[in-house]
Amino acid sequence: MNINLKLQQKGMVLIVGLIFLLILTMIGVSAMNSTALSEKLTQNLRDSTTAFEASEASLAEGESWLTAQTTPPVPVSTCSSSPCNVWQANTLAAPYSQSSSWWQTNAKSFSGTIYGVVAQPRYIIEYYGFVPYELSPDAAGRGQGYYLYRVNARGTGATANAQINLQSIYSTQFN
């Protein structure tokens, strides 16, 4: 009776084994795809974090430059030799939407060195306005008050695709 059962099976173990191997292969391929996707996500996150930190460093340098000034810098509406220190309000068309070559031409370069980036970050300072200490015309005429500047910064990551633009309104006094 045992001999009869063995003759009837005829390769069923082979079919079950192949199906099991196919299922394991599909699980392995799926796991590899998931790992590759995770690596891409991690690289993109690292790239954007590097760009953010570069942009933040450039923004801080622009603000530090303003702090170091003893008199209000004279804003310009046209610049004969770029990059200019301070631009007049509303002279530049939305710096955050400009191309990388525009930033290379019109913006000041970060003075330090940030490693692991495609290009060193850059910044632009725009005069934003003046708010006198008092509402009397005398205070405004003497230049006593707060000078407002908009500092725009752009940083890139390890690839040119990761670009971060930061902007701050910076207030300082010169008297």
Image: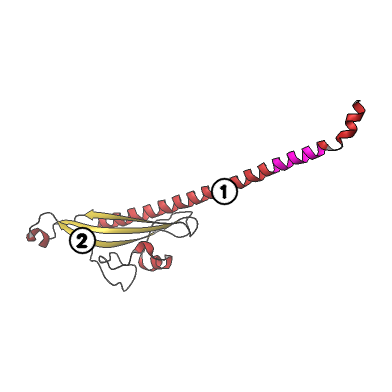
Say which of 164 and 37 sits in front. Answer: 37
Q: Which mark is residue 129?
A: 2
Specify whether 7 is left or right of 49: right
Question: What amino acid is found at the position of numbered circle 1 in the picture?
Answer: Leu
Specify whether 50 is left or right of 38: left
Q: Quadrant of the N terminus?
A: top right
Q: Quadrant of residue 97?
A: bottom left
Q: Estimate how packed mark 2 is, as few (under 14), some (14 to 19) or many (20 or more) residues with alpha carbons within 10 Å.
A: few
Q: Quadrant of the C terminus?
A: bottom left
Q: Quadrant of residue 10?
A: top right
Q: CA distance from mark 1 to mark 2?
A: 48 Å
Q: Which mark is residue 144?
A: none
Magenta span of residues: 13-25
Q: Secondary structure at mark 1?
A: helix
Which of marks 2 and 1 precedes in the sequence?
1
Specify whether 46 is left or right of 72: right
